[in-house]
Amino acid sequence: MTKRCILSLAIAGASLTAASAAAQTVGDSRNPIFRNIYTADPSAHVWADGRLYVYPSHDIAPPRGADLMDQYHVYSTNDMVNWVDHGEILRASNVPWGRPEGGFMWAPDVAYKNGVYYFYFPHPSGTDWNNTWKIGVATSTQPAANFTVQGYIPGLESLIDPAVFVDDDGQAYLYYGGGGIAKGGKLKANMMEIDGQMQTMQGLVDFHEASWVHKRNGLYYLSYSDNHDQNGEHNRMRYATSTSPLGPWTHRGIYIDSTDSATNHGSIVQYKGQWYAFYHTSMLSGNDWLRSVSVDKLFYNADGTIQLVKQTKQHGTPYYGSPRAIPGVIQAEDYDNGGQGVAYSDGSPQNEGGAYRFGEGVDVGAIPGGGYHVGWVSSSEWLEYTVNVASSGTYTVSARVATQTANGSSLRLAVDGQKVGTLTVPNTGEWQTYTTVSTQVSLPAGTHVIQVRMGDAFNLDHLTFTKQG
């Protein structure tokens, strides 16, 4: 018995060039919203045509950390449900002063002034990429096509993550940073030079990278990624406020918790009366460096502080058509999605019958004496199950597992993208010699997606969820 999971998607095909890019409808209202290529670091803007545009970076598979990121695309929507990929607008080989080896096209941003769209992107100018970052600028009279590199902003430090905020009076400000350094300053009217000196942003707590500035009711908000790295959880998104676009800032707290990715980077924008938080996760690939953009509604309290964003992950049809019941037993082979998305070197998914194929490394085999196990899984692969939790509380999760891996393995559990527990899988001596390992987790009531991530290879027979108390 072999079960393969297929998730229908629009497939990009060959990489598009700026000259030949053709718009195509991709994604939907489910998170992650873009599924034709891997995307991260979303910068969202609403332009005069009434559409919301997202300018993300692009993770290329197979990943090599963030080294291979390249080939920026632009997405837009007029209803937050149907999205258009306008195609590629820029790649490293289009940058005359850029790093000879290419890659390293990290988190961008865009600003509009006097009929021109300015695309700001970080890119090294030398092989020694970490010490040669420049903030490049490309321009176009269109929001999603025909960008031409004009040069880079002179006199800046070797830092990343440009963000540009244009205030109500037309004055533009550049923010950038990384590695704990956060700076901001005025841009000249040409949008390509600093007016005066860049200033260190004062009052931020635990700044890491990913500056973003927006304004609401006369108050300026600077949001950013922090350095959190505990218990398998990583960067969170914090924010601070000020009555001035360059601070000093007052730290207000966290507005997005850790996701299932090793990084966090986002933007905040209002569209048709509703505020939204854009960010990225690894929920589509299960790989920290193959990320995908997500979006959720963002809400403010009466005093102007931001409520913690509820991260959502809508899901496809559960296996057998209905969620698995908890408390209860979930057979490993009854997964909805599994494995790791396979992609070509340009980042576009493999096309097999017009669908994205998951689970190529995951297989189902028979257990002697009856039943099936899931096996042939690697450390970057995963399984997902749609479940219905009868009531909130503490549950004991027991996994029936077997492995010949010398040092054993691990099984990590996440609920709706948030890690909840880890089970240690010992070496059982034989691939079909099973033992039971357990841990306790806290589960909320309702319908959720449970993700099982693998350590080194092992066979999984089933999971049992028992309510405590």
Image (spheres, rainbow, N blue to C red):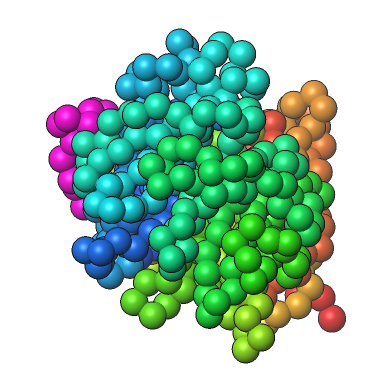
Please state the extent of the stretch shown in magenta in the rendering: 11-25
Q: Quadrant of residue 398?
A: bottom right
* Residue 15 on image: x %, y %: 26, 29
Q: Is residue 253 at least partly visible in the picture?
A: no
Quadrant containing the C terminus is bottom right
Q: Is residue 241 at least partly visible in the picture?
A: yes
Q: Residue at x 41, y 60 (%)?
A: 170
Q: Is residue 152 above or below residue 214?
A: above
Overall secondary structure of the magenta stretch?
A: loop
* Residue 375 on image: x %, y %: 58, 36
Q: Is residue 429 above or below residue 78?
A: above
Q: Residue at x 33, y 67 (%)?
A: 80
263 relative position to 56: left or right: right
Asked if residue 15 lies in the magenta stretch, the reply is yes
Nearer to me, 367 or 51: 51
Q: Residue at x 68, y 61 (%)?
A: 247
* Residue 452 on image: x %, y %: 62, 50
